[in-house]
Image: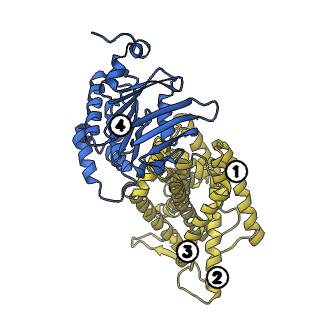
Amino acid sequence: MNEAIFFLNNAVVPGLVIGSIYALGAVGITLIYGILRFAHFAHGDLMTMGGFVSYLLAIGLAGIGVSTTFPVAYLILPVAIAITAVAALAIDRMFYAPLRARGVKPVTLLVASIGVTMMIQGLIRLFFGTGTYNFFEATPKVIHQIRLPIEGVTRPISFTQPQVVMVLVTVAVVIALHFFLTRSRFGKAMRAVSDNADLAQVSGINLRMVVRITWIIAGGLACLAGTMLALDVTLKPDLAFNIILPIFAAAIVGGVGQVYGAIAGGYLIGFAESLSVFNWAVLLRPFRDQLPDWLPTNLAIVPTEYKLTVAFVILVITLLVRPTGIFRGASL
Amino acid sequence: MSLIELRSIVAGYGGAPILHGVDIAIDQSDIGVVVGPNGAGKSTTLKAVFGLLTVTAGSIVFDGADITNARSDRLVPMGLSYVPQEKNIFPTMSVEENLEMGAFIRRDDFSGSLASVYEMFPPLKEKRRQKAGELSGGQRQMVAIGRALMSRPRLLMLDEPSAGLSPRYVLEIFERIVAINKSGVGILMVEQNARQALQIASRGFVLAAGQNRFTGTGRELLDDPEVAKSFLGGAVPA
């Protein structure tokens, strides 16, 4: 039983947490691809920027003497989301819109987004240096522990408060996004543009408006994911740049342009990673007397430091076997 | 005054112009049909009206307002609607959502228009929850025309509505177009199926090499031996 709880704490919870982050990032990437037809490489840095916006607001609030029993980051999150959404709109206006107006190929926009990546990271390093920041200097991170009332169980199920909040918020966002895309006038217009942009325009849908809504949603979700990730680990200038590749893998595995695919892909990659680095030998411990001695003590599929390869393996298999992804998105 | 008037339009895709002075004028009561050989600039004419390519000379006037080179999403609220020849549906959206997108510019209750589209095309009502991309060619064309009607246009422009349809559907689509016109919507359509289309036309325009060659009522063009010989594939059958 203790082993099962160890599995829950060290494989299921981390998978759920990182899967939520990947899902929120991949939804943004897939929406941008669906509407603007390019791979937005700077999305990770938009997430990092969102984390830093939240951090600045949090220390600002602490500076004027606001103190809360919970991390102040939850309080300022809506403001941070709004600021990051505006920043995403500004980035589009300054860097991508002029290129679109010239009718450039998608690969040019991709390269431009790599430039934006470097610019955002440079700006963050300029103001914050290369160090790491912690949201929990004032208030300690709350750790929930659930002890099961079963004899012989010594290990509690444990997870942190930000992890719970993150998973709940992700579920809420997914539901909200679903209703937005299937019920609202502008949500449907976004799907129409993603389906057939020319026809959407001749139907009277203002493409610029749809592009703006896309950036607001993608920027807002990026801020949410970046802040949540910073709450779970620590904030640093390359926070989300380091996970942009699994996020892209999630979007591609799910089917590019497919929102539900991106969510499924996010959790798939997240769980694949956490299950691959989990030491399966732990689960065999109750049977150690019957097992041969030559069995190694570590049975993880890949060592932790090679976690990134898991996303790549899944990505390569997807591209070979089903290039359009699980939900049959655009073929790359 | 005509509902729409194209005066000596010169237009193209950026290179050499494809249209070298096209003149078209129709009233709201008209079914205007543009026919002509491949490459004559028929579809290009419709695209030029709908702001999908650049008009370099001449002018387009709709109901007294100059709409030369207007952006297409601005034309829909003015009362123009356009059904492209290909890719004229939203394939992953349901039939009903396709129709809703046609009514995107309307902020009033459009359930009446929805009901009348379903009345005109009963198969669509049955399949309203189905993805439009899963429908047959004829039903897709119904979705496309239905979508264009949802904005309550005064002028409906159709680019080869019968292309790729079986003869049964061609007849049905033409009948519907006549009915739409009777309900007070001007029609301007391009057709490959020239003889059949001119039979329902009140105004016919024969284009060749980007210029008007013949203009008249549909009957006049059908009866003109020269038009019949050059553009309708032989003499009028007895």
Residue type at tag 4: Ile
Q: Mark 1 points at which residue?
A: A112
Chain of the residue under the numbered disc 3 shown in the image? A
Marks 4/1: CA–CA distance: 45 Å
Give the number of the disc on residue B187.
Answer: 4
Are discs 3 and 4 located on one and the same chain? no
Q: What residue occupies the far bottom of the structure in this picture?
A: A65
Judged from the image, the secondary structure of the residue bearing numbered disc 4 is: strand
Q: Name the residue under label 2.
A: A60
Marks 2/3: CA–CA distance: 13 Å
Who comes first in sequence, dot 2 or dot 1?
A: 2
Colour of the chain lettered B: blue
Chain of the residue under the numbered disc 4 shown in the image? B
Specify few, some or many for label 3: CA neighbours under 10 Å numbering under 14, 14-19, or 20 or more: some
Rendered-image quadrant of the C terminus of chain A: top right
Judging depth in this view, the residue of B30 and A331 nearest the camera is B30
Specify few, some or many for label 1: CA neighbours under 10 Å numbering under 14, 14-19, or 20 or more: some
Judging depth in this view, the residue of B105 and B87 nearest the camera is B105
Colour of the chain lettered A: yellow
Marks 3/4: CA–CA distance: 51 Å
